[in-house]
Every structure is written in C-alpha cells, then in structure tokens.
Amino acid sequence: MLVGQLFILGNLEYFVLGKAAQAREFEADRLGMILATKAGYDPSAAVEVWGKLNRLQDRSLSDYSSLSAKHLRERIDAMVSLQPEMEKKM
C-alpha cells in the first residue's frame, strides 16, 4: 500500500514539475548508488530493488501506471548504466 502511495506522489510531481523533477530523481538515484556503494552495498542490489518496484507497479491499476512504468524503467536503465562506475568504487 505504501509503495503504491509513493508512486502516486512521485507521478504527481512528475506531472506538475516535468523534466526538472525527472532530472532531480536521476541525480538522487545516482547519489544514492554512490553512497550505498561507499557503505559497502552491492550496486547491483539497487537495480534488483527497483526491478521489484517496477513489477509491483505493473500490477497496479493506477491511472498513471503507463507513464510511471516508462519513467521507472528509464530510472532502472540509468542505474544499470552506472553499475560499472560503482563497481570501480567498491
């Protein structure tokens, strides 16, 4: 339930603030991966977690699901592209 509510709030921000919000989300994801990697976490775990969230999102019947699923997939793809850089920091 909470996950669904968080997705709805994120989608509202996306609709209201558009590309600026998306850029902040990508930057927050990148910084989160850097901090988690420096703390000793496996950077591939972030992709796994977001993949699980994506699957949960796919099962929701939200009016915003098609937009948010595309946006979430873009965020996951961005994290995948960061993995080689994060692995160097381990």
Image: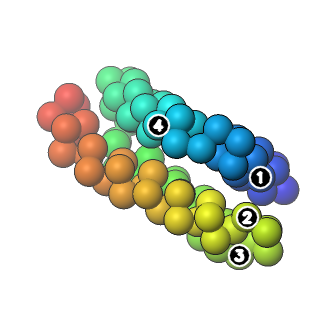
| Element carrying mark 4 | helix
Circle nearer the viewer, 3 or 4: 4
Q: Is residue 22 above or below residue 51?
A: above
Q: CA distance from mark 2 to mark 1?
A: 7 Å
Residue at the disc numbered 4? 23
What's the residue at 18%, 45% (across, down)? Answer: 84
Relative side of 76 to 71, left or right: left
Residue at the disc numbered 1? 8
**Residue 52 x, y percent position in the rendering:** 56, 62
Circle nearer the viewer, 3 or 2: 2
Q: Quadrant of residue 39?
A: top left
Q: CA distance from mark 3 to mark 4?
A: 26 Å
Instruction: First in sequence, mark 4 or 1: give its number.
Output: 1
Neighbourhood count class around disc 2 (C-alpha, 10 Å): few under 14, some 14–19, many 20 upward = some
Q: Are marks 4 and 1 in contact (CB under 8 Å)?
A: no
| Element carrying mark 2 | loop
Circle nearer the viewer, 1 or 3: 1
Q: CA distance from mark 2 to mark 4?
A: 19 Å
Amino acid type at mark 4:
Ala
Residue at the disc numbered 2? 64
Q: Which mark is residue 62?
A: none
Circle nearer the viewer, 4 or 1: 4
Q: Is residue 45 above or below residue 58?
A: above
Amino acid type at mark 2:
Tyr
Picture quarter with the N terminus: bottom right
Q: CA distance from mark 3 to mark 2?
A: 12 Å
Amino acid type at mark 1:
Ile
Q: Is residue 65 above or below residue 71?
A: below
Instruction: First in sequence, mark 1 or 3: give its number.
Output: 1
